[in-house]
Amino acid sequence: MHVARNRRTYVAKSGEQRVYESVLVRRTYRDGGKVRHETLANLSALPAEAVSAIEATLKGERLVPAGQAVTITASVPHGHVAAVQLGLPALLGPAGRPRDLALALIISRVVQPASKLSTLTWWSDTTLGADLGVAGASTDDIYAAMDWLEHRQDTIEAELARRHLAPAANPSKMALFDLSSSWMEGSHCPLAARGYSRDGRKGKLQIEYGLLTDPAGRPVAVRVLPGNTGDPGAFTAIVDVVRKKFGLEQMVMVGDRGMITSARIQAMNQRDDGTPRPDAYGWITALRAPAIKKLMADDGPLQLSLFDQQDLAEITSGDFPGERLIACRNPVLAADRARKREDLLAATEKLLAPITARVAAGRLAGAGEIGVEVGKVISRYKTGKHFAVTITDTTLIIERRQDQIDAEAALDGFYVLRTPVPADELGASAVVTAYKNLKYVERDFRHIKSDDLDLRPVFHRLEERVKAHVLICMLACYLTWHLRRTWAPLTFTDQDPPQQDNPVTPARRSAAAQAKASYQYDQAGQPYHSFRGLLEHLATLTRNQVRYTGTQVTIAMLTEPTSIQRQAFQLLGAAIPLTSK
């Protein structure tokens, strides 16, 4: 018996040509020398899938229920770890197990930041562990890989500097540098020390680390320093790296106020014997408030009348010979600082009011006791300098120092940049833009410390392990920098920020980015994601181990990717790989 399909064409009365197909079950046999066909059933009215099942059965095929046709023996998240690589293996060093472990640590820091012990177990829960051969790694293997990576830091950073800081890639010959800190858990690391905490963790030991980037904020190098290192000392260290290890000449270093001091400038551009260096470095930084106040005093070069028609003016001063001073005034920033100051002063007065009432009621007496209570609260919001406090054994008088408040308010919205770079090489607007680009380094610190990579706190004890941990986070930040830009069409990232005609005014998001935030979906109805949300969506692209019924062989198959997952890999310029290596 077999299934036979008969097709015939006929023309209807309307003249339309139609095709009729009949599906029959027939028995074929020989009658003498002739082949005969006997129709046993007409299947034309049955659904196509039923006809296919009958046909397959008559051909001798074994049919099983759909739910029992295959067995999925394993299903592991794959898409996120497959996407997060971008040619990083070649940057790290020669192929081998140490490189695979180091690569796995960096990818894990991007996709699932956690402690090293948690990362070990997580590797087995994704395709990363099997593809890189690290699923069975031990803690000793991880520490050995961290030591291997730390020894290769100079080589890795030199390659990044060649890619992003060398004149061919960086015609402006400009580099950004800033310093941050993170607290330590434990007390035996040689780098741990008490210093100014940028995390607000007072009383904790900490480390400092300086990040060097290109003008767009792409991480290039990082240096870990003792927790009590000041900004100027960190700047000196990174200049030595750029000049001696990267071999870059005549760079323009951009750093925040207080980092590029006059002493550091002199040391940067002089040899050890005191003679000028032929490869002198330029720099861009900002003046501190006392220096700005001095420029404004006694009919100095900085006067409010300069900003009647503009918010940017270039001035000179005998206190800064051979330098250009670019003064800027941002009215929006001035109003914001005035509002914030008033709020903090009012909050301080609210804290002091109960103490004043206790003294007036006689419930608190003695100059010493009163002073202790006032001291507990008056500096909480860092406004103590704006109050005059008079204490006796029975009285407490607190008044605002209005003249000091007014003097500080006169500087609201003002900042002055200093640089020796000639105007024909870098205009005043370009100097302001270069300095404000330090916001990119601050953004990198946010990604490293909390948003993406979770560097803090640091639990390692040995100095080289701490440095390796920070290096892993820096390289992971390098990955996220590229991924955020590449995946901007799929996320809320502003992929085409508008050019600012006036660099002093606040930056604005493009209309397209505002539309993303407002509508949440693109024109095709696909939702936009945050960067972290996109990684989580990519993780739903799994690799499955499939075994067909009646066999012992398993094959690897990917789930059908969503349109967003396909587009994410298309933006990376790669097909969706079956394996991560």
Image: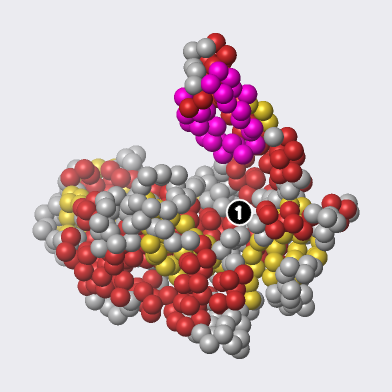
In this view of the protein, which residue sits in the foreground, 444 or 131?
444
Q: In the rendered view, would you say 321 is above or below 195? A: below
Instruction: State left or right for residue 452 relative to residue 390.
Output: left
* SS at badge 1: loop
Seen in the picture, residue 21 relative to 376 is either above or below; the reply is below
Residue 292, x across and y down, in percent: 72, 56
Considering only vertical position in the picture, is 49 above or below 426?
above
Q: Is residue 321 above or below residue 412?
A: below
Residue 496 position in % (x across, y down):
64, 58
Identify the residue at horizontal 44%, vertical 50% (top origin).
Answer: 197
Report the magenta residues as a range.
369-397
Q: Is residue 446 left or right of residue 189?
A: right
Residue 2 left/right relative to 108: left
Q: Can you identify the residue that label 1 sits on?
A: 494
Q: Amino acid at mark 1?
A: Asp
* Residue 121 vs residue 276, the one in the foreground: 276
Q: Nearer the viewer, residue 213 or 280?
A: 280
